[in-house]
Image (spheres, rainbow, N blue to C red):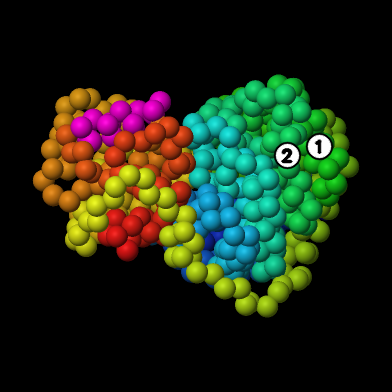
Amino acid sequence: MTGDDELIRLANSVLWPGFLGTSVSPWLADALEHGLAGVVYFGQNLHGDTAALSAEIHRLSPTALIGIDEEGGSVTRLETETGSTLPGAAQLGAVDDLEATRATGYEIARRVDAIGADLVIAPVADVNTDPRNPVIGVRAFGSDTELVSRHVQAAVRGIQDAGLAACAKHYPGHGDTHLDSHHDLPRLTLTSDEIAAVHLPPFHAAIAAGVHSIMTAHICAPSWGEAPATLNPKVLGGLRAAGFDGVIITDALDMAAIRETVGLGGGAVQALTAGADLLCIGNPTNPGAAMLPNQDEDDYRSVRDAVVEALRDGSLPRERVEEAAARVRRLSAAVRSRRTPDAVSLDAATIADRAVTVHGDLPALRDEPTTVIDVRRASTLAVDSAASHVAVALAAGGEIVRLDAATAAEADIVRAAERARQGQAVLLADRVDDDSPQRAVLDGIRSAQPDIITVNVGLPATTPHPGALIEVRAASLLAAQAARRALLGA
């Protein structure tokens, strides 16, 4: 083996790329055969026989770790075509039944195991203390530290009881931000003591539950320095000081907070230097129309070559990468080494119904096609799964009218109100507080149609809401079905 081959194999051992398509391309096969740590599945990979794809990946590299974002609720990859049929974190937090949370984690892992994947990139351990948060919101169990901590622990146990690895995210806590790190670098403007008291305990609870991995956040906590947490040795060192010896996984390096600051390659080297063990490169479809035909291979090579060069010139100590690779190997060996009997009972529909809150007088609608006036924010890159299917399920064959609340003119609101008067209709929102553009649109339509019902799939309202309001706490098929039952008076 030449020196370069050895460095490539060492670099590969800590890389976790996404890829295009539903088969193993030549570049990916070569990387797997040369020590690639594994891959991350995204929606574009799951349209064929995913179990066969996983088997081929594991044939090429038996130790490869296949990860997938499968949180239940608003974030699903397995049910991208329909929306999730499992409860999300905010629904589970509202019900506050730890056995329900453990059973949901177990069922998520069972489904992930069925497609041959190894690691569930969940649960979300963020404490969502900022109701404006555009990227966490209902993905968190709640805004109370103790509640989030106990449900994170239950979810970790459920996932790992099924024999897979869990990954608590996004350390040191993405819940007190109002920017999305896919597009910006959020700042956590709290003191280190405030972060320690409010946002770190759920991660410590995950560690106590034996979580195999923890994912970092691309957020800046000025009290710990200006570098994003993913690249900050002081922040990542806090995990080791807390007794965590599992795998520290970076959030996707192709997110703007990294790509547009230090770049993919620079971010990779800095993250490893800071103490990360496994580099999630990201989803190659994220550039959208700007995506290159070989975006997956291009991103992978950018990261791999930067790590190889840093190893070659000594700016990245070889011992640091070998330490990271050893942790990744231990994680791979631990997957499926322990599994409890498949005897976990989960009644997802009952959990979703228990999580529903109704405000105001709720006239029961008829069981017929319903016009849905959808004023929600555009989906984020994190929640790219199936948000549109919520409106489809609520409409039950009726028309869907999309209205961008941030840009809607008075004439748009008048037309939407007129459409609502023509038959049975409901409003669909995900932020209904006074300071939201959605609230202004909702109030405008409600002034013309006072008895129209609003279905809120986002965080519960923190300010009084006029008129009838159903809060379901997830943008999922399961939550939409629960909302439909409430609308029909069931």
Residue 457 is situated, as x and y percent measured from the top left of the image, at 41, 46
Residue 98, located in which quarter of the rendered image?
Answer: bottom right
- Read off the magenta span: 434-447
What secondary structure is the magenta-colored segment mainly?
helix
Q: Is residue 447 left or right of residue 379?
A: left
> Was residue 408 drawn as part of the magenta stretch in this picture?
no
* Residue depicted at x 39% and y 28%: 434
- In the image, residue 161 sits, relative to residue 10, either above or below, namely below
Residue 417 is situated, as x and y percent measured from the top left of the image, at 17, 37
* Residue depicted at x 81% and y 59%: 330
Q: Residues within 10 Å of mark 1 (few under 14, many from 20)?
A: some
Mark number displayed over residue 332: none
Seen from the viewer's position, the closer of residues 264 and 425 is 425
Residue 429, located in which quarter of the rendered image?
Answer: top left
* Residue depicted at x 68% and y 25%: 190
Q: Residue extending furthest left? A: 422
Give, as a three-letter code, the residue at label 2: Leu
> Was residue 439 drawn as part of the magenta stretch in this picture?
yes
Look at mark 1 in the image and give the residue it sits on. Answer: 238
Give, as a three-letter code, the residue at label 1: Gly
In this rendering, does residue 67 appear at all?
A: no
Residue 107 is situated, as x and y percent measured from the top left of the image, at 57, 67
Residue 56 is situated, as x and y percent measured from the top left of the image, at 60, 68
Mark number displayed over residue 200: 2
Real-space Cα distance between discs 1 and 2?
Answer: 10 Å
* Residue depicted at x 40% and y 36%: 431
